[in-house]
Amino acid sequence: MAQAEIGIIGGSGLYSMPGLTDTQDVRLDTPFGPPSDAYALGTLEGRRVAFLARHGHGHRILPHELNFRANIHGFKQLGVERILSVSAVGSLKEHLEPGKFVLPDQFIDRTRARISTFFGEGIVAHVAFGDPVCAETANAFDRACTAVGVTHQRGGTYVCMEGPQFSTKAESNLYRSWQADVIGMTALQEAKLAREAELCYAALAMVTDYDCWHPSHDSVTVDQIVAVLVRNAQNACSVVRHAVTSLPLTRGCHCDSALQHAIMTDPKAFPAATRARLAFLLDKYFPQPAGPSASERKAGV
């Protein structure tokens, strides 16, 4: 039985979810290792949610160290169908000033050392990813930003860089020449894995500062960035709460069938160990044959 219907991922500055009631911390194990932290299960605005601090409480995990597969698998284990993801980003455009929110609908991958798929080791799948976020879930974020009164942009391109260092000026100007809007280090792998897990995913990107292309970048102090982070986190909590209430009770998108035509490997060729590790994805389309009943086992069948 599902323990939560909506997952929330908190990024830099957002390590808990105010307003969550009837809470319990649940630590999970997955075939891909441990998630970033315990999931905080509870009720938010009348909906059952699971909150995960992406970088762990105390911000202990670098972006490239994140176990993205375990984090998404954990949400799937809990019965989550939609993920509302919050992350801090730098701005690549003058009009996207610090404090503004962006709802990206496209990504550019500039990462190098990350695992972005559940598949491999004998089972091949290629999910469609032309539209990498769930429009229905992004709509809920959009309505919530408007309701809260947060200045935001619907749509935009998110450059996902490897990190943990920030961009050089040459890189920053290159991304600007591509007409990208914001730059961050985490959302793309989550979006890819959520699609493979047939979960709806949308990101709320909170601008903390201009990337290093901007003439005023070098004059920005750490205190100023922290102040924006705190303000963004407060606004993000309000947006997430409104988005939770705005999400339909049933999904009207196609995210829940992303794997229907994506698995290329003949089921007869599935390696047993890989098949077992991917049971949470494969059982829907390739049910495991039922084992013998207790009476049959007793009879030696």
Image (spheres, helix red, strand yellow):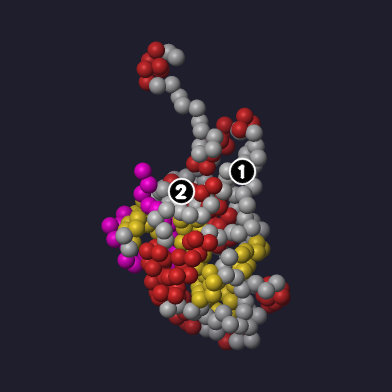
- Residue 159 on image: x %, y %: 63, 67
- Residue 17 on image: x %, y %: 37, 65
Q: Nearer the viewer, residue 21 or 141?
A: 141
Instruction: Kindly identify the residue that appears in the image at 55 percent across and 57 percent down.
Output: 191
Q: From which residue to which does the magenta span run?
A: 1-24
Q: Amino acid at mark 1?
A: His
Decide whether the magenta segment is chiefly helix, strand or loop: loop
SS of the residue under disc 1: loop
Q: Residue extending furthest left?
A: 22
Mark-to-mark CA distance, 1 and 2: 20 Å
Q: Residue extending furthest top?
A: 299
Q: Which mark, residue 76? A: 2
Q: Is residue 12 left or right of residue 259?
A: left
> Quarter of the image holding residue 94?
bottom right
- Residue 111 on image: x %, y %: 64, 61
Q: Quadrant of the N terminus?
A: top left
Task: Answer whether residue 218 is magenta in the image.
Answer: no
Task: Of the two numbered discs 1 and 2 on the same chain, state the one appearing first in sequence.
Answer: 2
* Residue 267 visible in the snapshot: yes
- How many numbered discs, if any? 2
* Residue 222 visible in the snapshot: no
> In this figure, which residue is indicated by the disc labeled 1?
261
SS of the residue under disc 2: helix
Quick check: 156 above or below 217? Answer: above
